[in-house]
């Protein structure tokens, strides 16, 4: 019965009709798409890099397509579970702490690039040693091993996105539409987003400022405050920060010339 309760909203046609015809819900969906694209662009690069081991373009495209459908399926499963768990204040507290950690870690690494680079290098060396020690005959073909690898990365990447999205909206249909369109946009326009973030480097720290705001939003909803920020207000804050970030970029370029942060 609990499982039916978790996934019932996905099959409620009235819920879908309400979401698809609601201007407020579409504002939140657009917010989720923006966040998905900005926070997941590096993930798209990683997924694309994984396909480079395949011998031809056809197999690379097919592996990403299979990975996309797998990402959709996992997103559906995890949103249903998350919608149920997010009602427990302990889960909200853990989620808030985790999102604060992600935001803090990003800005800490920005202030200490040498330490961040050393940690990344150590991680790469550990992974290389791990794969080297695993050289053996594989049951699955290279293509299917690549698809499984993409699916595994999708699962890891999507947990952050779903947690952040559920902090923005408790309606699983809103989260599902925003996430799925976001995944499609992120996969399809990853190169454009990378170039845009290269032109406006402030977009990346802006995304982690939003993560911090989402963490605060979750925290304020906990006892004893139990203050829920209206979704419309949150969407206005997000797009206001986006506009201010772009204006700040052009002001900085005009005053100091184009320099990366």
Image (cartoon, helix red, strand yellow):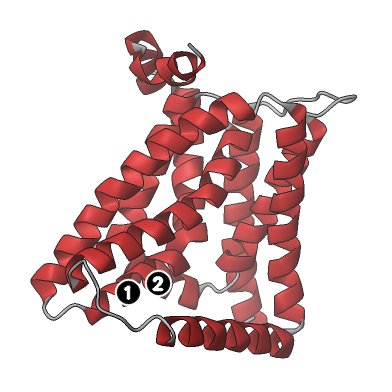
Q: Residue 208: x, y in percent?
A: 65, 59
Q: Residue 211: x, y in percent?
A: 66, 52
User: Which residue in the protein does label 1 denote?
Assistant: 50
**Residue 49, quarter of the rendered image:** bottom left
For the point 48% across and 71% down, the residue is 197
Observer-nearest residue: 20 or 42?
A: 42
Residue lying furthest right in this view? 224
- Contact, CB < 8 Å: mark 2 with mark 1? yes
User: Which residue in the protein does label 2 denote?
Assistant: 46
Would you say 207 lies left or right of 116 here?
Answer: left
Q: Secondary structure at mark 1?
A: helix
Cα–Cα gap, marks 2 and 1:
6 Å
Observer-nearest residue: 14 or 55?
A: 55
Observer-nearest residue: 134 or 170?
A: 134
Q: Residue 173: x, y in percent?
A: 42, 26
Disc nearest the viewer among 2 and 1: 1
Quadrant (top left/top right/bottom left/bottom right) for the C terminus: bottom right
For the point 41% across and 41% down, the residue is 75
């Amino acid at each position: 019965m609990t499982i039916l309760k978790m996934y019932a909203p996905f099959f409620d046609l009235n819920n879908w009709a309400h979401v698809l015809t609601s201007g407020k819900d579409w504002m939140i969906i657009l917010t989720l798409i923006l966040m998905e694209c900005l926070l997941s662009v590096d993930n798209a690069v990683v997924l694309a890099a994984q396909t480079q081991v395949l011998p031809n373009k056809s197999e690379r495209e097919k592996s990403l397509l299979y990975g996309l459908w797998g990402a959709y399926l996992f997103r559906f499963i995890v949103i249903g579970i998350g919608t149920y768990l997010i009602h427990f204040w302990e889960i909200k507290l853990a989620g808030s702490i985790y999102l604060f950690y992600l935001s803090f870690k990003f800005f800490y690494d920005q202030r200490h690039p040498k330490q961040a680079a050393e940690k990344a290098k150590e991680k790469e060396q550990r992974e290389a040693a791990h794969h080297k020690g695993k050289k053996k005959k594989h049951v699955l073909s290279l293509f299917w091993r690549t698809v499984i690898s993409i699916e595994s990365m999708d699962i890891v990447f999507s947990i952050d996105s779903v947690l952040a999205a559920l902090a923005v909206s408790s309606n699983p249909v809103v989260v599902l539409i925003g996430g799925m369109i976001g995944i499609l946009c992120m996969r399809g326009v990853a190169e454009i987003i990378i170039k845009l973030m290269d032109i406006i480097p402030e977009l990346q720290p802006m995304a982690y400022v939003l993560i911090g705001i989402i963490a605060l939003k979750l925290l304020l909803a906990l006892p004893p405050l139990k203050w829920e920020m209206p979704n419309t207000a949150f969407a206005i804050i997000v797009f206001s920060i986006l506009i201010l970030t772009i204006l700040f970029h052009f002001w900085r370029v005009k005053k100091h010339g184009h320099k990366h942060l």
